[in-house]
Amino acid sequence: MTRLIRILFLLLIAAAAFAQPATTYQMPPKALADLVDAPAFPIATVSPDSQRILLAEPPPLLTIADLAEPELKLAGVRFNPQTHDQPRALYFKKLTFVTVADGKQVNVTGLPDNPRVRHIAWSPDSKRVAFTVSMPSGVELWSAGIDGHAGRVGKVILNLTLPGAPFHWMPYSTAFIARLLYDERPPAPEVERIPEGPVVQETTGRKAGVRTFEDLLKNESDAALFDWHAQSEVMLVNLYGSVKGILRYGPVTNAEPSPDGKWVLVETLHRPYSYNVPYYRFPVMIDVYGVDDAMRYRTIADLPLAEDVPIDFDAVRQGPREVEWRADKWATLVWAEAQDKGNPRLDVPVRDKLFTLEAPWNAAQQPQLLASLPLRYDGIEFGGDELALITMSRWRDRKSQTIAIQPGHRDVAPRMIFDRSSEDRYGDPGRPVLTYGTLGRQELRRRGSSIYLIGLGASPEGDRPFLDKFDLASLTSTRLFRSTAPSYEQPLVMIDDNTVLTRRESVTEPPNYFVRDLRDHTTRALTQTPNPVPQLASASKELIHYKRADGLDLSGTLYLPPGYDQKRDGALPVLMWAYPEEFKSAKAAAQVTGSPYRFTRPGPLSALPFVVRGYAVLDNPSIPILGEGSKEPNDTYVDQLVAGAKAAVDELVRRGVGDRDRMAVGGHSYGAFMTANLLAHSDLFRAGIARSGAYNRTLTPFSFQAEERTFWEVPDTYMTMSPFRYADKINEPILLIHGIDDDNSGTFPIQSERLYQAIKGLGGTARLVMLPYEAHGYRARESVMHMLWEMDQWLDKYVKNAKPRVGAGS
């Protein structure tokens, strides 16, 4: 009897231990792990003369040790305070030159062991590339010639505390303008341990609503630390490492030389800083300095703190913005200035004006008006004094326009080139093709009165990328190339008028780079990347079409397991992975996204790996939230969300591949928000997986996602859309996963913690997994593997092996 009691006691201990949440990183089944560990595809950059490409190979994932490096979070940026680097950023471990003419490959040698290469940039003469290499002592500047030999540029250390390019090539290709760590700065300020007083903020009736930002300054101690770490010295650095000062000192966000190399455009932050907005809303000086004498020749603007920018999507700060060098002139600046106080709700005939100003920057010079725009300025591409294309848009009704102007003939009226809805993927004319001009900058590629356009070519059968020749005189297109089944081929760069560099793939062939001749339609392979995931070769992929109950056309990509036979295997458990999207027109909402001919290579955060675990995976099914005319999409969010999900479930059941009693839904970020809502407002699914979501919209009161209205304008909409309010209705198991250091606007980790506590307190079934050091997108191999283990365990327990429900379902 005593022995029996002892055995029962030990069994109870073992059961209790098994029931405890995992406290160490777990590995998923090998079939899932192998997909994550498969080599990543190289990324190509093309030389200015189009004679070579540089292949940069990234690692599959970082490690948790990478993420555990020291990190400061100040003013909306995260950086390593010891190296002034951003260790979470994507980097490359191998570089290879490929000659376009014959495909000859030259590996770059001389790099440190296990290099972390970033910020790759070709020299204007196409003979070298420069890049940064992250080292324990700081971020170094390196260069490699097309012969493959690489070396460090002097002993300079770059400052990558603030985002943006840390260096720019000079036009003569033997020197750089770079942001360096300032050697003579005083010691770092001490972090305030014992405060001298409270942190005080005050408002006096002026509206200054802001979206929900992360990592803001909290006190003067934070501000002093940010100030110290952001200080850079802008220097002229030649290939041999000698330096010459341009601007002595400052928290510089941009330092770019003019096309003639005589001037430098410098943007520098200054106080007063803010506890309410990130660094890019801080006061900023925009100046032109001379390269030879390091003198400041002209201040373009001194912009004040921008805490009161409206929350509308078209809202901008007042004063000169998007100041840049004109690509086709030696030393001419162009910028935009709002004419509506930056507020798109004001009714004005001119929304933005474009101005230009050119050297020699004397005080008597006044900026010249280039164009007056009825919509918000989005960008400009120059092609000489006879042509520039300006794009502008309005978010409220999704209007997008492109006009052509003649910069050298300002008395000539602009011509409308494209006037369309930005939602209309089928009608997207494409983006203008650029080429490197005589000044070494990218400008419009022209042939007579024609330009060239590259687009995704969205269509009812999926994306079919194209290259067009577009005549600006007649506004007509001539199609030079369009991708055809069974391949997905995307034009990248025009080598000349008859040859184009493309990236081609198919369901069974991984992406590789090709040279396509537009005259005889022949292709020549430049790379031969092998299939990194042969285990998915026999998996089925299909772009499926179905309808919502109200008749709206929907679509999604259906993946079925390798070797699946419907007659033999019957209906499968399903994982539906989605992300809702708002639309202003039913026509746009019904358009197909994606392509059935792309290679199946699951990303580390994708749901596709579960196809090798016996699930049917419906990836990116249409979940449109429609609000036409004066109606807003989110006013009927829940009804439309459930209707879209039900249509997908019904279609999978109709096809016989999905088991209605074994359906799971999941998503990341806004897809996680969707998942919690679907579990709260329907019985379509047996379980859900919600990663890094926001579930209480009152915590994002000054708009979120595509919602421009504030909580106080539409409180019912905010409350109805919040699944936290309906936690008592979430009666299916939900797996909540969140990065402890989430840096995304609005998706604070507390969002998942509070939803879990609510479900737990109400007697529901949930599991909360908080991933150490992870931000909004998970980067460490340990985190991703554990995430997949959690998902696999959850799906097996609550979906794959679930018993049929009685009287439940849709």
Image (cartoon, helix red, strand yellow):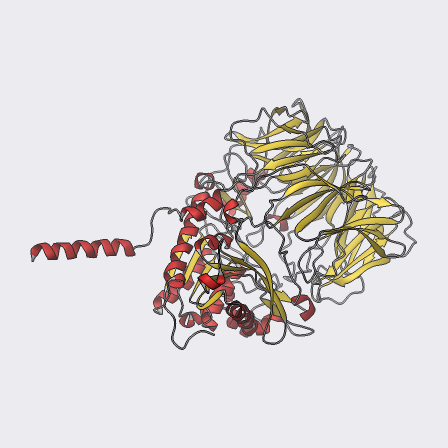
Residue 144: x and y in percent read 65, 27
As drawn, 598 above or below 767: above
Q: Quadrant of residue 204?
A: bottom right
As drawn, 730 above or below 246: below
Q: Residue lying farthest front?
A: 568
Judge whether residue 428 can be spotted in this image.
yes
Q: Is residue 6 left or right of residue 373?
A: left
As drawn, 111 above or below 207: above
Q: Count the numbered circles shown.
A: 0
Q: Is residue 371 left or right of residue 117?
A: right
Residue 283: x and y in percent read 65, 48
Judge whether residue 204 can be spotted in this image.
no
615, 594: nearer the viewer: 615
57, 348: nearer the viewer: 57
Residue 132: x and y in percent read 60, 33
Q: Quadrant of residue 371?
A: bottom right
Residue, x 64% and y 56% (percent of image)?
595
Q: Is residue 179 left or right of residue 193?
A: right
Residue, x 54% and y 40% (percent of image)?
86
Residue 541: x and y in percent read 56, 56
Quadrant for the N terminus, please.
bottom left
